[in-house]
Image (tube, rainbow, N blue to C red):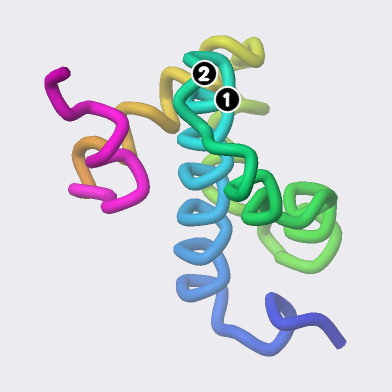
Amino acid sequence: MTALSKMTWHDANQAHLTREIAALRLTLQRRSGDLPAADNAKLPEPGVVVEAREVMHPPPAVEQLCSAFGLSRFERATLLLCAGVSMGSPALSATWRAP
């Protein structure tokens, strides 16, 4: 049994969203060249999305939205970016600091 399968749907959904936002933050940092080499070890575990889809019934809310509206990868990333900012995510706060 995985960690997600032991949680309530609401908690697992929140954990999934938090991981997805953290992965987006790391992607933005990597592409901007703002990610030190030592931070490469902090990359999220691969397969989190696949695990969540397989274990959670119904699937995570973000996956349901993407499926219902046929969102592209770019649109999905934009949705996650907006969710992270509106949630006041610490994972994105450092990304948006002024230089």
Q: Quadrant of the C terminus?
A: top left
When asked about the image quadrant of residue 16, the answer is: bottom right
Amino acid type assigned to the residue bearing label 2 in the image:
Gly
> Which residue range is magenta in the image?
88-99
Q: Position of residue 71 (x, y in %)?
A: 60, 15
Element marked by disc 1: helix
Q: Position of residue 82 (x, y in %)?
A: 30, 28
Element marked by disc 2: loop
Disc 2: CA contacts within 10 A as few (<14), some (14-19) or many (>=20)? few
Judging by the rendered image, the residue that carries numbered circle 2 is 33
Answer with left or right where residue 7 lies relative to residue 98: right
Residue at image coords 49%, 47%: 22
Q: Alpha-carbon distance for marks 1 and 2?
A: 5 Å
State yes or no: discs 1 and 2 in contact (Cβ < 8 Å): yes
Whether residue 66 is situated above or below residue 31 in the rendered picture:
below
Amino acid type assigned to the residue bearing label 1 in the image:
Arg
Indicate whether residue 93 is drawn in magenta: yes
State the residue in front, 68 or 46.
Answer: 46
Q: Position of residue 28 (x, y in %)?
A: 49, 23
When asked about the image quadrant of residue 92, the answer is: top left
- Seen as rendered, the residue at the extreme left is 98
Residue at image coords 57%, 25%: 30
State the residue in front, 22 or 38.
Answer: 38
